[in-house]
Amino acid sequence: MINQTKTTVIFACPQCNLAHEVTQTHSHTKKAGGFDCADCGAAVHFWYGCFDYSDWRAVNMNSMTFTHPNALGDPNQPR
Ligand SMILES: [Zn+2]
């Protein structure tokens, strides 16, 4: 039985900064591959080695890496 270690890692697009969540698994054979940005199509990550990546998907990181002009609402607005 193969004992796989799964890790969730985040890669941000170098072009539009869209975050992508991907499941990283350790592989016993060398793997090569790559992912493109789900939004702008730029190359986000390429690999060759003993890791494999799956479940590539864009994620909304909200306030972590994105700027939301209206996220906090209008401070002048009465509650
Ligand atoms: Zn992008």
Image (spheres, rainbow, N blue to C red):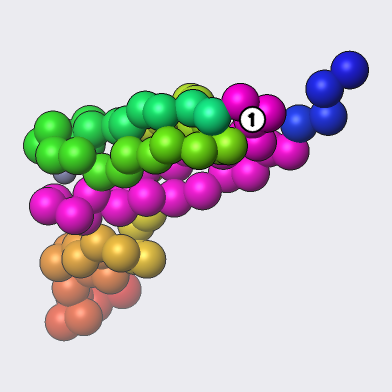
Q: Is residue 38 above or below residue 68?
A: above
* Residue beneath the point at 13% across and 39% down: 42
Q: Which residue is mark 1?
A: 27
State the residue lying farthest toward the top.
1
**Label 1 crowding class (10 Å Cα cut-off): few <14, some 14-19, many 20+?**
some
Give the image location of residue 45, x and y in percent: 31, 43
Q: Is residue 16 magenta?
A: yes
* Residue beneath the point at 64% across and 30% down: 27
Which is more toward the observer, 37 or 43?
Answer: 43
Q: Is residue 25 above or below residue 20?
A: above
- The stretch of residues the image draws in magenta is 5-29
Tell me which secondary structure the magenta stretch mostly adopts.
Answer: strand
Residue 35: quarter of image: top left
Q: Is residue 32 visible?
A: yes
**Ligand 1 picture quarter:** top left
Q: Is residue 1 above or below residue 3?
A: above
Q: What's the residue type where badge 1 is placed?
A: Ser
Residue 71: quarter of image: bottom left
Residue 65 vs residue 29: left or right? left
Q: Is residue 37 magenta?
A: no
Q: Is residue 60 visible?
A: no
Give the image location of residue 60, x and y in percent: 35, 46
Quadrant of the snapshot with the C terminus: bottom left
Give the image location of residue 77, x and y in percent: 19, 75
* Residue beneath the point at 19% across and 39% down: 43
Q: Is residue 78 above or below residue 1?
A: below
Quadrant of the snapshot with the N terminus: top right
Query: Does dot 1 land on a helix, a strand or a loop?
Result: strand
Q: Is the CB of the residue bearing disc 1 within 8 angstroms of ligand 1?
A: no
Residue 65 vs residue 28: left or right? left
